[in-house]
Amino acid sequence: MKLKQLSLVIPNEPGALVRVCEVLQRHSVNISTLTLADTANFGILRLIIQEWEGALEALEGDGLVVKVSDVLAISIPHVPGGLHQILALLNEHRINVEYMYGFSLATRERSVQIFRLNDTDRAIEVLSQAEVCLLEPGELFL
């Protein structure tokens, strides 16, 4: 249920994101999803990649510093209140959402949210008991 996410701090300047994508392209690595948050001087690029070990090796081989984190991919009904139910459940069990990002699936009936939590193992237990749809890596990378 856990996914590996690669995070990089990159300069907030032209060419920084191109460099990362160029490295991955050179090594035939496909990005499944990503998010980029910025500050005045740098950005935090977070990547979900099926072949994350190869991506890690390629990026570090190019001199980039990469952090690997466990995240969860949660499939949520794409309806008003769908996300609220998940957040309320996590809050009830004092599980903190450190950050999240997501995307809608082609059917628009569900969305996938990537969650970085302060206690991933506890979250898996709580969410599984509530029959929340946690995606396995193979389901995300179809």
Image (cartoon, grey):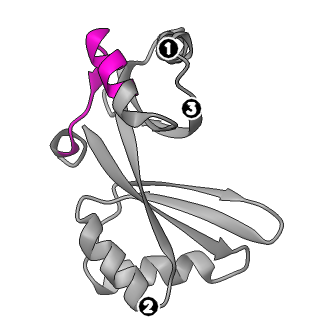
User: Relative to 23, does residue 135 appear above or below in the rendering?
Assistant: above
Q: Provide residue 21's location: percent of width, then percent of height.
A: 45, 76
Front-lying residue, 110 or 9? 9
Front-lying residue, 141 or 109? 141
Q: Secondary structure at mark 1?
A: loop
- The answer to which quarter of the image holds residue 45 is bottom right
Mark 1 and mark 2 lie on one chain; the one further toward the N terminus is 2
Badge 1 vs badge 2, beta-carbon distance below 8 Å: no
Query: In which quadrant will I find the N terminus?
Result: top left
User: Relative to 70, does residue 49 appear above or below in the rendering?
Assistant: below
Residue 97 circle label: 3
Q: Which residue is mark 1?
A: 93
Regarding residue 108, the answer to whether it shows in the image is no
Q: Which residue is mark 2?
A: 62
Membership of 125 in magenta stretch: yes
**Residue at horizontal 52 percent and vertical 40 percent from the top:** 101
